[in-house]
Image: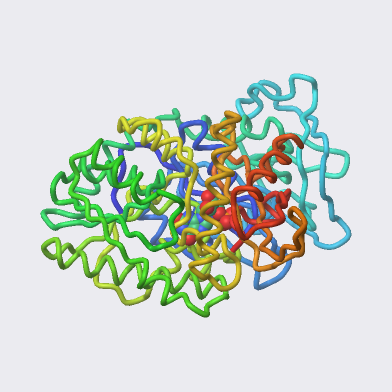
Amino acid sequence: MTVPSHQRLLIVDYGSQVTQLIARRLREAAIYCEIHPFTAVTEDFLAEFRPQAIILSGGPASVTDPDSPRAPEALFTLGVPVLGICYGQQLMMTQLGGKVESGHHREFGRAFVTPVGHAGHPIFEGLFADGREEVWMSHGDRVTELAPGFEVFGSSPNAPFAITGDPSRNFYAVQFHPEVHHTPNGARLLRNFTRLAGFTGDWTMAAYKDEAIARIRAQVGSERVICGLSGGVDSSVAAVLIHEAIGDQLTCVFVDTGLMRLNEAEEVVGLFRDHYNIPLIHADESDRFLSALEGISDPESKRKTIGRLFIEVFEHHAREVGDATFLAQGTLYPDVIESVSVSGGPSVTIKSHHNVGGLPERMNLRLVEPLRELFKDEVRALGRELGLPEQFVGRHPFPGPGLAIRCPGEITREKLDILRKADAVYIDQIRRHDLYDRIWQAFAVLLPVRTVGVMGDSRTYDYVCALRAVTSVDGMTADYYPFTHDFLGETATRIINEVNGINRVTYDITSKPPGTIEWE
Ligand code: XMP
């Protein structure tokens, strides 16, 4: 672990579905933080990480269960401020000498907290302007007796210990979730806690860039690196950052998997060759990928197959460019968090993103992943900091497995061709209506279903195409984009008229959760 120049906060994850939001709220306040599962947070870990403050997340367990997760005792004797949220609060009370009861105290949804004493305390700064704060509760257990040293700071009709604190130790604990949007001033409470802990909000992209460059140089030394370029913003930013760090030691490889969108290969290779002086190999591997995927319809098998082939291709080119020993990837923080759970963390794995979980266990290349700590919007900010043209930075995300996961079921060249054409019409429509930059990601999906239609005087029996467009801040949660009916009607007509093989178009209005953005 390298020791960075900025202050850092540790978030211990007890498995809440919204733990990532704590990190988001803090990053928005220019505070560097990392989430680690409670299983990893040992006394040794704490000594190495040296956090300046700690937040204990919520979680699904009950502290009244003897096997429920705990924090190492050392966490409370480090002398750093601690904030417990929901399960985190109950855990603090249990471990520090209070009492928690389970059952018959379930409370979900909106509540109003009013302050109890402590007027003017810095934890209240900017809060309770109207005498109360709206908060979001979601808990089954509740605290019935405070641990010694703790006092009540705020209460709600159903939660007498909604906000509690031990100011002498700078320990605070809340029953509600300040990290969610349903607690409108929750971010302010989190920021007040970090201010009490001495954080100044010193985490900037310029600082991150310098630090990342230094780290890449230290990791790579004089060895050679190859970087898989997909045309997406992540791999582009990773490539330019690494190029700044090690110059010609970097070679980029654009792997045409046969799963790219219409004209994508030409566009990406062209853009990179025109803008940058980075050696670039254009590898046409479509036959290899498409034949390996023949007959596979299970989404995870597709992802694993593609992950394995990518590595084979990279290993091959690594030897070709003069024995590269490192593979650079644009892995992002949300991928890391989801993949951590595979190896024992408390939240469930939804899908194995190919740049993390889909990689084979045995691989000859070591990984360089300079974006591992960043959320997508932060990667875009870093891209701008590095001077990348807006046409790279503003591109919608495109997943590593490409169109394979937008063609549910078995993939064929015929289906991919149809999908590519439909997707191109759809994106063209979005650009014509000037909507591209308002949408996080838009794409077409070709469903493995044929339906009957009528065109002219003839019967048709063709595929169904689903359109997806979502708004999001970081891809962790998303809402479907509210196109007008006119737009949807016009787009459906164009797709059916211009794309042979599709006779029906639907619009996906599922948010994430419960859906995911991609269909597989
Ligand atoms: P989901 O479908 O999980 O997607 O809601 C969230 C974001 O991640 C992208 N995505 C991937 N990106 N490799 C990637 O590089 C992958 O395997 C992968 N799977 C999903 C997806 O396009 C969306 O932006």
Q: Position of residue 47 (x, y in %)?
A: 37, 55
Does residue 79 show up?
no
Q: Nearer the viewer, residue 505 or 401?
A: 505
Count up the numbered dots. Answer: 0
Q: How is the image coloured?
A: rainbow
**Residue ID at (37%, 52%):** 230
Does the image show residue 257?
yes
Q: Residue visible at 74% across and 65% down? A: 451
Q: Is residue 286 left or right of residue 38?
A: left
State the quadrant of the N terminus: bottom left
Q: Compare residues 9 and 79 and report the one nearer the observer.
A: 9
Q: Is residue 179 above or below residue 86?
A: above
Q: The C terminus lies in which quarter of the figure? A: bottom right
- Residue 17 located left or right of residue 368: right
Relative depth, front residue between 219 and 298: 298
Residue 179: name its quadrant. Answer: top right
User: In this orientation, which residue lies closer to the viewer: 140 or 507?
Assistant: 507
Residue 25 image offset from top left, x and y in percent: 57, 37
Tell me where residue 104 appears, x and y as whole percent: 89, 59
Determine the residue positioned at 47% across, 55% down: 399
> Residue 429 location in percent, x, y?
59, 37
* Residue lying at the far front of the rendered structure: 457
